[in-house]
C-alpha cells in the first residue's frame, strides 16, 4: 500500500501549479492531495430534479429551475441598488435578484436561451424571489453518465477570481481521484468494515465527491464520519493509557489534621452532596498511585473553590505543596482573600503571586517555596515563570481553565520530576459530547447541584429604548440596599471603541446616579492592578453601589450583596460569556436580576441567544444551545487550539456515531493495547501517521 501519493503537494496535481497551490494553501488549508480529497462538498443538488415555478411554496431548500431570463433592470435608490430579472418557465415567473456584481450580470444572459437556475427561493414583499442564483446554460446534450447528485464546494472570492469556483474544484477532485485510483489505503480493520457494513475508504472518498444516489452518499458520509470520530477517540484513549503508565503520581494516603480541623471547625456551611461526591473522587485519584488528571465542571456558583481548597488540604496533610492558578489578578486576589479567611488559625502558610507582586516579596516567596515553608501558592500566570520552583509540588489546580493557553498549561507540569496531580476547574459547562471528544483522556467530575437556598436569577431583556425604565429599576434596587454591576463588552479587535463605550456609559450613569446619593466604581483592563483592586474593594465594602466594568469581572468574582447584573450591548456577547456574567449575581439570599440591554435591531442569532438566556438558568442547556448556534469550533478554549477541526462529523448531530466509535475504540484497545495484532495493523499505521501529521489536541491538558 502506498501512502505517499496522497502526501504529494497539491501543486503537482494537473490543473493546479504553484500559484493556485498557494491560494489553496491559504484559503482552504489544502496542502497535499489528501487534503483535497478531504475537502468535501458542503451541499448536493439533485440534478435530475427540475422544479416548476408554480410548485414553489413553503420554506424551500435549494432548488433547480429551467427557463428563460428577461427584463433585466437596475432598481432601488443609488445607495441601495439591485439588479432584478424575470425568470419564467411554462408554469409561471419568479424574480431573480442581485445585490452585488450588478454590472457584471447585467448583460450576461441571452433572453432567447434556456438556462438552469439554481438557488434558494426566499420571500420578499410577499413574493418569492431568488437572490444571487447560480445560472448555467442548459447543456446541449444531456450528459447521460453525469451524476445526478452534484456536489458544491465552498469557495472564496479570491479563489473564484483565479478560476477556482466550486465547479473547478470539482474538476480537480475528479482528476485527483483518477490518479489515486487503487492507491488509497484502507485505515480501518476488516473486522470493523465487515461488522458495521461500512463502505471501504476509497469508495467512500469517491462517493462523497461524486455520489450517484442519495443512498451512496449517505453510506459514504457514514463511513467517513465514523472514521473521523473513531481515530479521535482512539488517539485520546491511547494517550490516556500512556499517561497512566508513565506518570506514577504522588500517593496521598492520609487524611490528617488539616482536613479534619478545617472540616470540623472552619467549614461555614454543610457541603452539598455534589461537593462531597467530587471530593471523594479526587481523593480516590490522589491515592491511586497514578497521576490525577481531572476536569471539574460545575456551574457558576456551585462551590468549586471549596473543593479546590479541600484538595489542597489533603495534599498538605501528606506533606506536599499546592498551587492554584487563576486567569486574572482580580480573581487570584479574591481567591487569596477568601481562602486566607477560611484558613485563619489553621497554620497553613499561603501566599499570593501575581504580576504586581513586588520583587522583594517575590524573593521571599521563591525562598519559601524552595524550602517548603510555603504550603499553598495562589496566583496568575506569574506562577508559571521559570524561576518559580517548589520543594515538593504535588497538586496543581487551575481555575477557569479555558482562559489558559495550551502551552501555558503544559508549562506547569514539568516543574517537578514526579508530575503533580492536576485538577482543572471550569464553569463553562461542556456538553458531554464535546467533553468526550475534547477531554476524552481526562476524568471528569461534575458538580450538578447548587448550594441550598439560592433563588434562580430572573433574567429580562430590555431594548436600549427602555433605558429610563432600567435606571428606575436600579434606583429601586439600590434603595433596598442592593448593589449593581453594569458590564460593557470588551473585544480585542475593537478595544478602543469598546473603551469609549464604557467611558461614555460611565458618564451617563454618573449623570443618572449623581453624588452624594450614589457612588460608582469603575474597573477596566487599561487600569493598573492597584487601581482595579482599590475600586473592587470599595465595591466589596459597600462604599459604592454601582460597579461599571468590562468583562474583567466575568469569571469568579464573588460579592453576595451585588444582586443586579446589567449587561450592555448584550447582543455582542456569546452565550457562555453571558452565562458567566449572570453567574456573578444570585449568590446571596436576595432575589437577583440579570438585565440584558441590547440594540433595538437584532440579528436572528442574537435574538435567539438572548431568548435562551431569558428562558433558562441551566448552564448545560446554555452550553448545548451555544454549540448549536455557533458550532463547536467557536467554543471557548477550542478555537485557539483548532482542536475540533472536524471535516465531516458533527459532534452534536453525530453523537450516536461518536459513542459507538468510542466504545469500539476502547474494546479494541482492551484486547490489543499496542495495536499489534495483524488485523489491527491498518489502524496502527494510520494512528502513527496521524500522530505525525495532525496537531495533537491530546496535549492540551
Ligand atoms: P464557583 O463554583 O463559581 O467557583 P464559588 O466557589 O465561588 O463558586 O462559590 C460560590 C459561593 O457559594 C461562595 O460564596 C461560597 O462560599 C458559597 N458556597 C460554596 N459551597 C457552599 C455550600 N456547600 N453551602 C453554601 N454555600 C456554599
Ligand atoms: Mg470560581
Image (cartoon, rainbow, N blue to C red):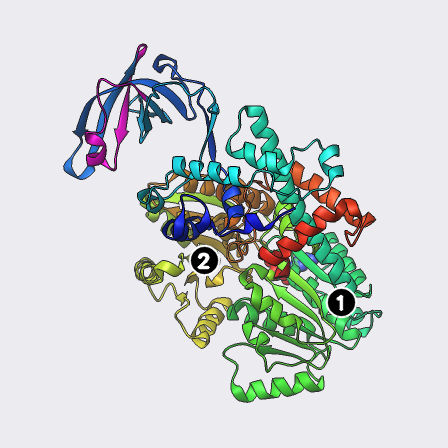
What is the secondary structure assignment of the residue under circle 2?
strand
Q: Indicate the position of residue 640 as horizontal and vertical percent values.
A: 51, 58
Q: Residue at x 42, y 67 (%)?
A: 525
Residue 280 highlighted magenta (yes or no): no
Q: Indicate the position of residue 452 as horizontal and vertical percent values.
A: 67, 51
**Front residue (pair 673, 206):** 206
Q: Quadrant of residue 284?
A: bottom right
In the image, farthest residue toward the top? 90
Ligand 2 quadrant in view:
bottom right
**As drawn, is 104 to the left or to the right of 259?**
left
Q: Quadrant of residue 664?
A: top right
**Front residue (pair 629, 334):** 629
- From the image, tell me which residue sits under label 1: 247
Q: Is residue 452 visible?
A: no
Q: Residue at x 43, y 66 (%)?
A: 544
Looking at the image, is 528 positioned above or below residue 137?
below
Stretch in magenta? 90-115
Instruction: Single out the mark in the foreground, 2 or 1.
Output: 1
Q: Is residue 13 visible?
A: yes
In the image, farthest residue toward the left? 78
Looking at the image, is 555 positioned above or below residue 154?
below
- From the image, tell me which residue sits under label 2: 484
Amino acid at each position: 500500500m502506498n501512502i505517499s501519493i496522497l502526501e504529494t503537494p497539491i501543486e503537482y496535481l494537473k490543473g493546479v501549479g504553484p500559484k493556485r497551490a498557494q491560494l489553496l494553501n491559504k484559503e482552504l488549508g489544502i496542502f497535499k492531495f489528501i487534503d483535497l480529497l478531504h475537502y468535501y462538498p458542503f451541499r448536493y443538488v439533485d440534478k435530475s430534479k427540475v422544479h416548476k415555478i408554480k410548485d414553489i411554496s413553503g420554506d424551500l431548500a435549494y432548488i433547480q429551475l429551467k427557463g428563460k431570463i428577461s427584463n433585466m433592470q437596475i432598481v432601488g435608490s443609488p445607495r441601495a441598488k439591485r439588479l432584478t430579472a424575470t425568470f419564467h418557465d411554462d408554469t409561471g415567473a419568479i424574480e431573480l435578484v442581485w445585490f452585488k456584481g450588478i454590472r457584471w450580470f447585467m448583460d450576461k444572459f441571452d433572453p432567447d436561451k434556456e438556462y438552469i437556475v439554481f438557488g434558494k427561493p426566499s420571500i420578499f414583499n410577499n413574493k418569492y424571489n431568488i437572490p444571487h442564483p447560480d445560472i448555467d446554460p442548459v447543456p446541449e446534450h444531456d450528459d447521460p453518465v453525469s451524476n445526478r447528485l452534484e456536489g458544491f464546494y465552498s469557495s472564496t472570492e479570491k479563489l473564484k477570481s483565479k478560476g477556482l469556483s466550486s465547479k473547478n474544484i470539482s474538476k480537480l477532485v475528479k482528476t485527483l481521484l483518477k490518479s489515486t485510483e487503487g492507491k488509497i489505503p484502507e485505515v480501518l480493520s476488516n473486522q470493523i468494515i465487515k461488522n458495521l457494513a461500512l463502505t471501504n475508504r476509497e469508495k467512500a472518498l469517491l462517493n462523497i465527491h461524486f455520489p450517484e444516489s442519495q443512498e451512496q452518499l449517505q453510506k459514504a458520509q457514514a463511513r467517513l464520519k465514523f472514521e473521523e470520530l473513531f481515530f479521535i477517540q482512539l488517539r485520546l484513549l491511547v494517550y490516556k493509557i500512556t499517561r497512566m503508565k508513565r506518570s506514577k503520581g504522588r500517593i496521598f494516603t492520609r487524611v490528617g489534621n488539616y482536613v479534619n480541623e478545617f472540616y470540623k471547625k472552619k467549614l461555614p456551611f454543610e457541603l452539598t452532596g455534589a461537593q462531597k461526591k467530587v471530593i471523594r473522587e479526587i481523593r480516590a485519584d490522589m491515592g491511586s498511585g497514578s497521576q490525577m488528571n481531572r476536569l471539574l465542571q460545575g456551574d457558576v456558583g456551585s462551590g468549586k473553590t471549596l473543593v479546590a481548597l479541600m484538595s489542597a488540604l489533603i495534599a498538605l496533610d501528606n506533606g506536599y505543596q499546592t498551587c492554584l492558578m487563576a486567569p486574572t489578578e482580580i480573581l487570584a486576589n479574591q481567591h487569596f482573600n477568601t481562602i486566607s479567611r477560611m484558613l485563619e488559625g489553621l497554620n497553613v502558610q499561603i501566599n499570593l503571586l501575581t504580576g504586581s507582586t513586588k520583587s522583594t516579596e517575590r524573593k521571599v516567596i521563591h525562598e519559601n517555596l524552595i524550602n517548603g515553608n510555603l504550603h499553598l501558592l495562589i496566583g496568575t500566570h506569574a506562577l508559571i515563570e521559570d524561576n518559580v520552583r517548589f520543594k515538593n509540588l504535588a497538586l496543581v489546580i487551575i481555575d477557569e481553565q479555558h482562559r489558559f493557553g495550551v502551552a501555558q498549561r503544559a508549562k506547569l507540569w514539568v516543574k517537578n520530576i514526579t508530575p503533580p496531580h492536576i485538577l482543572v476547574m471550569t464553569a463553562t459547562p461542556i456538553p458531554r459530547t464535546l467533553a468526550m471528544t475534547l477531554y476524552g483522556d481526562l476524568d471528569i467530575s461534575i458538580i450538578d447541584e447548587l448550594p441550598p437556598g439560592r433563588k434562580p436569577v430572573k433574567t429580562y431583556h430590555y431594548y436600549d429604548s427602555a433605558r429610563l425604565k432600567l435606571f428606575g429599576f436600579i434606583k429601586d434596587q439600590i434603595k433596598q440596599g442592593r448593589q449593581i454591576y453594569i458590564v460593557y463588552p470588551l473585544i480585542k479587535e475593537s478595544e478602543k471603541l469598546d473603551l469609549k463605550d464604557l467611558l461614555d456609559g460611565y458618564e451617563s450613569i454618573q449623570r443618572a446616579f449623581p453624588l452624594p446619593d450614589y457612588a460608582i466604581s469603575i474597573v477596566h483592563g487599561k487600569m493598573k492592578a492597584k487601581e482595579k483592586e482599590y475600586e473592587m474593594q470599595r465595591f466589596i465594602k459597600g462604599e459604592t453601589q454601582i460597579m461599571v466594568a468590562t468583562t474583567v469581572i466575568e469569571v469568579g468574582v464573588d460579592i453576595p450583596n451585588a444582586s443586579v447584573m446589567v449587561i450592555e450591548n448584550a447582543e455582542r456577547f456569546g452565550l457562555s460569556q453571558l452565562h458567566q456574567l449572570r453567574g456573578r449575581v444570585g449568590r446571596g439570599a436576595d432575589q437577583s436580576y440579570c438585565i440584558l440591554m441590547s440594540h433595538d435591531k437584532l440579528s436572528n442569532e442574537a435574538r435567539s441567544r438572548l431568548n435562551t438566556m431569558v428562558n433558562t438558568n441551566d448552564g448545560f442547556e446554555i452550553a448545548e444551545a451555544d454549540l448549536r448556534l455557533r458550532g463547536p469550533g467557536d467554543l471557548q478554549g477550542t478555537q485557539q487550539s483548532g482542536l475540533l477541526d472536524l471535516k465531516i462529523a458533527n459532534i452534536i448531530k453525530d453523537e450516536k456515531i461518536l459513542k459507538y466509535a468510542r466504545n469500539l475504540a476502547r474494546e479494541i484497545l482492551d484486547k490489543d493495547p499496542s495495536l499489534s495484532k495483524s488485523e489491527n495493523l491498518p489502524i496502527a499505521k494510520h494512528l502513527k501517521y496521524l500522530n505525525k501529521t495532525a496537531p495533537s489536541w491530546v496535549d492540551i491538558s
